[in-house]
Image (cartoon, helix red, strand yellow):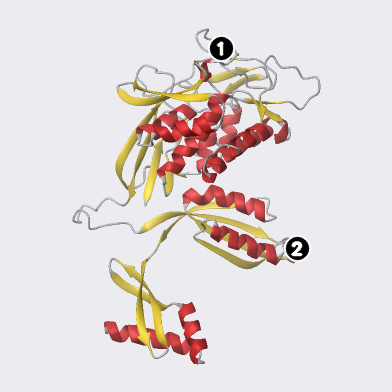
């Protein structure tokens, strides 16, 4: 199974993610096409830079003839840099410099007569329409839209306003939109089966806003990082931007130490700053999953048959059985590994259905959206599990009722399970006017006879 591991020892930002993707082997043309498809007059400039002795890839988003990230109209505590505001309609300064790209934020426009010292940004509806209209594969657009929706809901919670009243400024600027959409294209092109991620270093220091001083991470970033393992170490700088946090949230990786894997590609994506003695880069490792042989084993003889899966689960007591069945079929059609519908008794004695979906980690975001859209649920439980599967193959046996396919389940080459294909048995039973179980028994007997079981 193809897996990827993000090492966020220096946090994460949009430009860092793009650089890591390129450095790990994603074609630059994939990102260039994603940027061009948005029709924002944007392009990418890619260069190799040094980050504390590590050669890393740096990506700049260009708008016209200028780097878009240099065009923010807000002032920073250090005159050589610029920063946006953190609260709706209020200017602020930071008490420290950032370790990578300037911080991005959005603002709400809920109150009448509320004045802003800058131009209104794009709304979530505008950004969604911009992405949906781009000539990109559907999974790329779905991922990018989800990332912006996560950003919008985070800001809506912080400002206590409806999400439609949120207008993105720096996060809605050309560079941030290109960062997220190009990252989605790069992720899609890799075809990773499961994403993993280290705990995330958020950095340190404080942010001085009009309403007071906030510790790093900033409010929107902190909201997006809820439930993720984070820590603060090594440097008093803000290391995670809302764009970076939204990408991680949309990616929904498994968190923890690097899993057992055979790495064949490593990429370093550089942030904009280069502080002394701190390699400001995001590391991306890509390879095949597998375990390291134990000390007493011969190399290559011990492999881990377990794989990572996501379990999505919700209980429904107010949805028509017809719609429950439709949602189950839609989930299977959208890549679910399995769907289970279990009768349960819910509050107030109401009969309900426990709707459980098993899926690959890469498919989890899409199936989460499907459940929220196609059912009446208000929330989904998400679990990271491991499963062991027998490898499967087929053979065909000849019986007095005709040829029947046999499904075989193997572990390390040993056949542990045999099962006649039910549809073959049913068709043969109908054709010969006998019970299905007689055809099944005949198929198993024929297989055992051929293999002397």
Residue 294 is tagged as none
Marks 2,1: beta carbons within 8 A: no
Q: Position of residue 360 (x, y in %)?
A: 47, 53
The residue tagged 2 is 348
What secondary structure is found at the residue carrying circle 1? loop
Figure label count: 2
Q: Position of residue 147 (x, y in %)?
A: 57, 37
Q: Is residue 116 left or right of residue 340?
A: right
Q: Is residue 227 left or right of residue 196?
A: right
The residue tagged 1 is 76
Taking depth in this image into account, of 35 and 332 the one nearest to the observer is 35
Q: Position of residue 2 (x, y in %)?
A: 37, 49
Q: Is residue 158 above or below residue 427?
A: above
Q: Is residue 98 above or below residue 390?
A: above
Taking depth in this image into account, of 94 and 102 the one nearest to the observer is 102
Figure quadrant of residue 211: top right
Q: Quadrant of the C terminus?
A: bottom left
Mark toward the viewer: 2 or 1: 1
Q: Position of residue 395 (x, y in %)?
A: 34, 75
Taking depth in this image into account, of 438 and 163 the one nearest to the observer is 438
Res 440 visible: yes
Residue sitting at 29 percent across and 71 percent down? 414
Mark 2: few/some/many CA within 10 Å (<14, 14-19, 20+): few
Of labels 2 and 1, earlier in sequence is 1
Figure quadrant of residue 401: bottom left
What secondary structure is found at the residue carrying circle 2? helix
Figure quadrant of residue 328: bottom right
Residue sitting at 39 percent across and 63 percent down? 389
Mark-to-mark CA distance, 2 and 1: 57 Å
Mark 1: few/some/many CA within 10 Å (<14, 14-19, 20+): many
Residue sitting at 75 percent across and 63 percent down? 348
């Amino acid at each position: 199974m193809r897996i990827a591991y993000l090492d966020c020892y220096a946090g994460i930002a949009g430009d860092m993610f793009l650089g890591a993707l390129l450095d790990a082997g994603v074609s630059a043309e994939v990102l260039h096409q994603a940027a061009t498809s948005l029709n924002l007059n944007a392009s990418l400039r890619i260069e190799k830079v040094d980050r504390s002795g590590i050669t890393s890839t740096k990506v700049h988003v260009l708008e016209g003839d200028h780097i878009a990230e240099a065009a923010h109209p807000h002032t920073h505590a250090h005159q050589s840099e610029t920063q946006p505001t953190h609260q709706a309609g209020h200017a602020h300064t930071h008490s420290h410099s950032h370790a990578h790209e300037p911080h991005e934020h959005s603002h709400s426009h809920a109150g009448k007569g509320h004045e802003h010292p800058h131009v209104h940004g794009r709304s979530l509806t505008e950004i969604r329409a911009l992405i949906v209209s781009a000539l990109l594969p559907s999974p790329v657009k779905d991922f990018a839209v989800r990332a912006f929706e996560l950003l919008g809901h985070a800001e809506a919670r912080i400002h206590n306003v409806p999400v439609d009243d949120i207008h993105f400024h720096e996060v809605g600027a050309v560079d941030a939109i290109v960062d997220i959409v190009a990252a989605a294209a790069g992720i899609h092109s890799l075809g990773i089966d499961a994403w993993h991620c280290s705990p995330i270093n958020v950095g340190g220091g404080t942010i001085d806003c009009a309403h007071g001083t906030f510790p790093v991470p900033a409010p929107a970033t902190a909201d997006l990082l809820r439930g993720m393992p984070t820590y603060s170490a090594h440097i008093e700088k803000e290391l995670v931007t809302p764009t970076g946090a939204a990408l991680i949230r949309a990616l929904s990786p498994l968190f923890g130490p690097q899993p057992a894997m055979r790495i064949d590609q490593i990429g370093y994506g550089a942030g904009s700053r280069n502080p002394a003695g701190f390699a400001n880069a995001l590391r991306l490792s890509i390879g095949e999953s597998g375990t390291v042989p134990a000390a007493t084993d011969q190399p290559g003889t011990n492999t881990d048959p377990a794989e990572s899966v996501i379990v999505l689960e919700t209980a429904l007591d107010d949805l028509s059985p017809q719609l429950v069945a439709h949602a189950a079929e839609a989930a299977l059609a959208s890549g679910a590994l399995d769907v289970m519908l279990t009768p349960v008794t819910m509050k107030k004695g109401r009969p309900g259905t426990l709707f459980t979906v098993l899926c690959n980690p890469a498919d989890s975001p899409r199936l989460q959206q499907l459940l929220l859209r196609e059912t009446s649920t208000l929330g989904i439980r998400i679990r990271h599990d491991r499963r062991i599967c027998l490898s499967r193959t087929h053979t065909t046996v000849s019986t007095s009722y005709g040829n029947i396919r046999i499904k075989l389940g193997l572990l390390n080459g040993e056949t542990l399970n045999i099962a006649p294909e039910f549809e073959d048995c049913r068709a043969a039973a109908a054709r010969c006017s006998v019970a299905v179980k007689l055809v099944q028994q005949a198929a198993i007997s024929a297989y055992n006879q051929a293999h002397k079981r």
